Every structure is written in structure tokens, then in C-alpha cells.
């Protein structure tokens, strides 16, 4: 009974060797895949929650909300401040008109023939100096301007574009009610500056050159042809330079129109590029390279040449070319021909009432380069992606460790079952495995199954080895060392046919049917020798 059981075991073992490729994945690999799939499923759920909660768009939403808040805040301040400057300009025009109308009456001249009395212009301007200076101190403006439609030098070339007037600059325009010492003289007779102890700026000129100052003629011509009140006749100029050495500025110009409807000049206040930059720059905080532009809209494009900029950063790719505005779902796209590509938000700011003589549209935009915005939007996602990849790597390692630790005692027990007497196997402390070992030991004891050393088949196999001839024993010994038939032929310098003939005789004398069965008996011999060595 014991011999038949052992033979059955040997045949099962040989069949296992022949069909090992059909067993599928080992238990350890299966468990590793299970744990990895489980952890990845949990991660997939976490990712789904993150996507649903919008965590991957948090930097995008944060950037959008920041720019939206900044745009709204700056637009409100511009609207309020420019309206305040407009009110100051209208009040200055009203007071200047009254003063100058009295002057003309006392001098017995008419505003329409003011040009015929150039010798009176210096005195007329000098008597308005105090009013201009005090008005500038009260207004949050970078300068005050008065231009009369006349020149003190009518005989000089280009006199038709030279206009007498006064221009006072506030050197600290961001300070309301600046002291008189902060005011400088930019246009007008030097005697007027000396009389009021005011220093001249290096860009000083005697008179205004209005050749390229289209807004001057626009305001005069519109006022002459209109019956609208002054509150509907003021005009905000585009950003321009009074002279090539002067800063870019916008001017709120109001016509000087007497009680008889005669227009003889303009006045108003200036918003310089420096004042605009100091007053309306975005609050950067964590965001850099954002800048603002306040621009007139012409033919649907933002006219950069006539705009004022805010912010301490101006990209190299930003040129003076018009900005084409292309609204999108969230951020608006701004593009310059042969220039840069920008993203941002924009809003329209109205500088005039609905019934004004001018209905020019102005637009405020906060811009950032497309590449910079992409960097900001992807920065946080890159960090999050790195953490997720790190979590995947940790999941793989944890799965490998857990699966190895879980299957190690099982594999060790199964290996021991195959290589040792079941009764001698140590406890694995896994109830299921220990119960199986106890059951197999009881079965072996009940069946009287001998060990590998005591096996009749093995002893017969060992006895049959003595029947081999010297040539056959040489081939058999090389099989013991693991060589193949072809390798043995090469070693013994024999033909493969001779080796095959020896094989048939060896198989017949040892009572085996194949090389695999032969190797199985050889393994049993080695195990018997190992057991004998342990007992000794």
C-alpha cells in the first residue's frame, strides 16, 4: 500500500513538472496584484473626489478670483478718481471763465480778438496763477493746465500752433493737498514763475505746441458748435506727451466759454503715467508679472499708444501695437500683431454721461503673459501630481511587502511538505496550515507510508545503478551533474547516437521511462543523503 501511494505521488510530481507552465501565477504574485489593485482603487476614488471638489482647478480658480477682485477694485477707484478730477476741472473752468471774463471787460477787449493783444497775455496769465496753484493743491492730480487760443509771438514761424498758457506740475501727485514747494513750472512766462517763487522744470517751454494736440482743437470746435452745458463738454484725452521730454499723461480738458458763448481756451487737470502707476497697480502678493492697462477702444481694439499702464512689470513682448480682445469662457485672450499673447480680464469704464458730446469707450484690463499664467496654473498641479505618483510608488512597495510577508510562511510550509517528512515539520502558527500538516501526518502514519530513504523503489533504483557498465556509468554520472545528452556527447567525444544508445540501456537497467523520471530518482537520492547527514 505504501509503495503504490509513493508511486502515485511520484507520478503527480512528474505531471506537475510537465505542466508547470499551465499553473498560472504564483500565490505571492496573485496576492501582490490584489493588494496593488485594492490600493489603486482607493487612489482612484480619492482622485475622483479631488476632481469633483475642484482641487485640481484650485490654482486656476484662485488666479481668476484674484484678478477679478483686483479688476473690480481698480475699476471702482479709477471711476471714482476720474470723476473727482472731472468735477475739479469743471469747477476750475467755471472760476477761470468768470475771472477772465472780468479781465476782458476791464481791458476792454473781446475773447474773439484776444490774439490781437499779445502784449496783454502775460499779465492775464499771471493773475490766474494763484487760482491754478490752489486748485492743484486741492485735487489729486499731477498737474493743472490753462491754454488760451492766442500766442505772444504771432509773427514767428509756426505761430498758428503756438498757444500761450500755464502748466504747473505736482512733483508728488499721490499726496493730496501737497505743499506749495512740491509745485513746479512747466509752461508759461518765466516772470510769472519768478513772481510766485516757483522753480522751472528742465522741460520748461514758453508756450504750448498744439500742432499734434488734436484734443485741443476737438474741445474748442465741439464747444463752439454745441449748446450743451460744460458738464457735457469736457473731454478726456488719450495718453500723450506735451513734449518729447515729458511723461505720457491724460488730460481732462474743459472749454473756457463766456456768457456770450465765445470759446477762448481750455483748462483742466492732468493724470500722468507715474500717478496712474502709483495709484492703480495690482496688489501682487503671490502673483507676479501682472500689469494693468487703461486704454481707449478704437475699432474694437485697445489703443495701446493712447493708454496708461500700471504695475512695476512690463514684458518685453508687450509693444505699442493695438490689442485685439477675444473673450473666452474665463480668461480673456489679448493678442498683439507681431507682439505678445496675453491672458487676463477686462471691463469697460465710462468717463462720460450718456448725453455727453463725447461717447468714447475706455477699457481697463489686467494682463499676464500666457506662458506665465500657464506656469502659475500648473505649478500646484505638478506638486499634487508628484505626491500622487509618490503615493503610487509607496502603494507598490507596501503591496510587495504585505504579500511577501503574508505568503512567506505558507510557501515555507508547502516547500517543507515536499522536501521532508511531514511529521518533522515545524509549526507555522497559521491555523489552517498547521491543521493541514497535522492531517497529512496522521494520514501518512495511518497508511504506513515509508520515508524517501526507506522506499523500496528508491533502494531498488540504487541497487540497479550497480548493474551499469563503465561506459553507461560515465554517462549516468554526467546526468547526475546536470548535463544534457548533447553536452555529454561533446564531453565524452562520442556521437549523439551513441549517447542515445547508452540512454536506452540506462533507462532499461534502472527501470525508468524518461530523463525526467531519471532526474526525479536522482533528486530522491539527494534528499535521502541530506536526511542521513542531519541524523548523523
Image: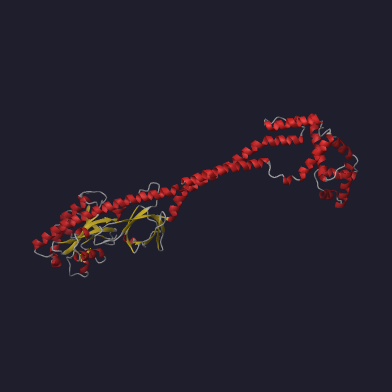
Q: Identify the colour scheme used.
A: secondary structure
Above or below 532: residue 258: below
Task: From the viewer's side, name the closer residue of 488 and 184.
Answer: 488
Q: Is residue 480 visible?
A: no
Residue 487 placed where, x, y %? 81, 49
Viewer-side residue, 114 vs 507: 507
Number of residue marks = 0
Question: To which quarter of the image does residue 125 belong?
Answer: bottom left
Residue nearer the viewer, 361 or 135: 361
Q: Is residue 87 above or below residue 10?
A: below
Judge by depth and name the residue closer to the eye, 36 or 236: 36
Q: Is residue 120 left or right of residue 287?
A: left
Percent position (x, y) of residue 82?
A: 26, 54
Residue 77 visible in the current orientation: yes
Q: Position of residue 75 (x, y in %)?
A: 31, 52
The N terminus lies in which quarter of the figure?
top right
Residue 341: quadrant of the picture: bottom left
Q: Position of residue 432 (x, y in %)?
A: 68, 32
Task: Point out the image quarter for the C terminus.
Answer: top right
Q: Is residue 492 above or below residue 462?
A: below
Amino acid at each position: 500500500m505504501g509503495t503504490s501511494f509513493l508511486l502515485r505521488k511520484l507520478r503527480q510530481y512528474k505531471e506537475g513538472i510537465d505542466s508547470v507552465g499551465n499553473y498560472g501565477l504564483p500565490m505571492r504574485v496573485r496576492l501582490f496584484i490584489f493588494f496593488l489593485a485594492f490600493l489603486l482603487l482607493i487612489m482612484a476614488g480619492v482622485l475622483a473626489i479631488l476632481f469633483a471638489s475642484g482641487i485640481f482647478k484650485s490654482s486656476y480658480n484662485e488666479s481668476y478670483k484674484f484678478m477679478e477682485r483686483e479688476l473690480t477694485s481698480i475699476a471702482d477707484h479709477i471711476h471714482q478718481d476720474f470723476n473727482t478730477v472731472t468735477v475739479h476741472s469743471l469747477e476750475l473752468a467755471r472760476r477761470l471763465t468768470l475771472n477772465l471774463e472780468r479781465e476782458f471787460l476791464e481791458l476792454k477787449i473781446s475773447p474773439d480778438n484776444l490774439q490781437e493783444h499779445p502784449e496783454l497775455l502775460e499779465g492775464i496769465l499771471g493773475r490766474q496763477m494763484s487760482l491754478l496753484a490752489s486748485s492743484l493743491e486741492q485735487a489729486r492730480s499731477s498737474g493743472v493746465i490753462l491754454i488760451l487760443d492766442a500766442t505772444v509771438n504771432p509773427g514767428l514761424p509756426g505761430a498758428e500752433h503756438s498757444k500761450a498758457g500755464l502748466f504747473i506740475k505736482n512733483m508728488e501727485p499721490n499726496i493730496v493737498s501737497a505743499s506749495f514747494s512740491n509745485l513746479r513750472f512747466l509752461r508759461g512766462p518765466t516772470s510769472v514763475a519768478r513772481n510766485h517763487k516757483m522753480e522751472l522744470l528742465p522741460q520748461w517751454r514758453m508756450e504750448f505746441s498744439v500742432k499734434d494736440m488734436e484734443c485741443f482743437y476737438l474741445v474748442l470746435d465741439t464747444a463752439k458748435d454745441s449748446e450743451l452745458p460744460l458738464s457735457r463738454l469736457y473731454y478726456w484725452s488719450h495718453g500723450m506727451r506735451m513734449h518729447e521730454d515729458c511723461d505720457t499723461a491724460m488730460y481732462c480738458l474743459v472749454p473756457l466759454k463766456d456768457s456770450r458763448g465765445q470759446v477762448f481756451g481750455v483748462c483742466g487737470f492732468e493724470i500722468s503715467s507715474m500717478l496712474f502707476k502709483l495709484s492703480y497697480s495690482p496688489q501682487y502678493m503671490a502673483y507676479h508679472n501682472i500689469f494693468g492697462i487703461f486704454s481707449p477702444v478704437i475699432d474694437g481694439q485697445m489703443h495701446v499708444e493712447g493708454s496708461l499702464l500700471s504695475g512695476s512689470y512690463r514684458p518685453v513682448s508687450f509693444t505699442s501695437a493695438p490689442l485685439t480682445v477675444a473673450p473666452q469662457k474665463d480668461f480673456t485672450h489679448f493678442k498683439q500683431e507681431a507682439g505678445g499673447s496675453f491672458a487676463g480680464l477686462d471691463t469697460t469704464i465710462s468717463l462720460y454721461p450718456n448725453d455727453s458730446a463725447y461717447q468714447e469707450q475706455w477699457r481697463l484690463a489686467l494682463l499676464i503673459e500666457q506662458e506665465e499664467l500657464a506656469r502659475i496654473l500648473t505649478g500646484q498641479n505638478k506638486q499634487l501630481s508628484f505626491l500622487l505618483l509618490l503615493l503610487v510608488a509607496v502603494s507598490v512597495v507596501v503591496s510587495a511587502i504585505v504579500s511577501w510577508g503574508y505568503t512567506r510562511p505558507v510557501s515555507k510550509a508547502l516547500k517543507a511538505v515536499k522536501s521532508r517528512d511531514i511529521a518533522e515539520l515545524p509549526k507555522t502558527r497559521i491555523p489552517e496550515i498547521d491543521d493541514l500538516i497535522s492531517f497529512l501526518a496522521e494520514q501518512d502514519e495511518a497508511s504506513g507510508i515509508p520515508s524517501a530513504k526507506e522506499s523500496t523503489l528508491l533502494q531498488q533504483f540504487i541497487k540497479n545503478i550497480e548493474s551499469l557498465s563503465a561506459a553507461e556509468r560515465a554517462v549516468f554520472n554526467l546526468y547526475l551533474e546536470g548535463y544534457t545528452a548533447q553536452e555529454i556527447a561533446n564531453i565524452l567525444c562520442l556521437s549523439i547516437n551513441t549517447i542515445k544508445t547508452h540512454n536506452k540501456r540506462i533507462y532499461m537497467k534502472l527501470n525508468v521511462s524518461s530523463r525526467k523520471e531519471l532526474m526525479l530518482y536522482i533528486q530522491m537520492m539527494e534528499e535521502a543523503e541530506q536526511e542521513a547527514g542531519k541524523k548523523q
